[in-house]
Image (spheres, rainbow, N blue to C red):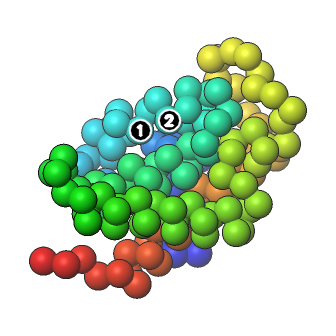
């Protein structure tokens, strides 16, 4: 398991949500504290506010990738295309490993639980959830992608 994967998993096990854990693992590279990265990613956990849509680990990976290699000029056509291609590739790698990027599908849920209340992080919670491993995988995918695609100056 890569350094970023270990860090993301550790953050998740500390109680951060899936998106916060992945973003937090890349906080130093983004020029942020873990607290700042966690705040930015806080609403993406549980598949976007616990609606069980796009997996929070994928959202955290997207946030970190965008911060590190995204664009900010609204007229930047090629940069926008490059950013979207990067995100599609990252999500594709995650999907190839897990069969989906949708939280409820990854958790085997027929539908969302219908409540914004997060579950208590008990030993039983960790036994039934693949989330620690999904968080680690998302961080590893991004770490590998960044190594394969050095930043242009």
Q: Position of residue 138 (x, y in %)?
A: 55, 61
* Label 1 crowd bin: few (<14), some (14–19), many (20+), radius 10 Å: many
Q: Quadrant of residue 92?
A: bottom right
In front here: 134 or 13? 134
Circle 1 — which element?
helix
**Quarter in which the C terminus is drawn:** bottom left
Q: Residue at x 55, y 52 (%)?
A: 58
Nearer to the camera, 75 or 147: 75
Q: Residue at x 46, y 49 (%)?
A: 60
Q: Position of residue 96 (x, y in %)?
A: 70, 69
Total numbered circles? 2
Q: Residue at x 46, y 43 (%)?
A: 20
Q: What is the x, y in percent for residue 83?
A: 35, 61
Q: Which residue is mark 1?
A: 41
Asked which secondary structure carries label 2, the reply is: helix
- Residue 139 in view (yes/no): no
Q: Height in image: 53 above or below 78?
A: above
- Whether the residues at callouts 1 and 2 have beta carbons within 8 Å, the answer is yes
Q: What whole-number distance in Å separates the C-alpha atoms at marks 1 and 2?
A: 6 Å
Report the front residue among 83 and 67.
83
The residue at the point 62 percent across, 45 percent down is 55
- Quarter occupied by the N terminus: bottom right
Q: Please tell me how crowded label 2 is: few (under 14), some (14-19), or many (20+) other residues with Cα within 10 Å.
A: many
* 54 shown above or below 147: above
Residue labelled with disc 2: 44
Residue 8 appearing in the image: yes
């Amino acid at each position: 398991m890569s350094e970023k994967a270990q860090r993301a998993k550790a953050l998740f096990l500390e109680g951060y949500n899936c998106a916060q854990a992945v973003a937090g693992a890349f906080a130093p590279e983004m020029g942020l504290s873990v607290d700042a990265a966690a705040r930015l990613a806080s609403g993406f956990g549980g598949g976007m506010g616990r609606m069980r849509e796009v997996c929070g680990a994928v959202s955290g990976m997207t946030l970190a990738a965008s911060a590190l290699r995204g664009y900010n000029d609204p007229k930047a056509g090629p940069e926008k295309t490059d950013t979207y291609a990067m995100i599609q590739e990252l999500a594709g790698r995650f999907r190839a490993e897990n069969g989906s990027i949708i939280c409820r599908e990854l958790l085997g849920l027929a539908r969302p639980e219908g409540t914004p209340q997060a579950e208590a992080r008990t030993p039983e919670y960790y036994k039934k959830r693949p989330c620690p491993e999904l968080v680690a995988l998302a961080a590893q995918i991004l770490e590998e992608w960044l190594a394969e695609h050095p930043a242009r100056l």
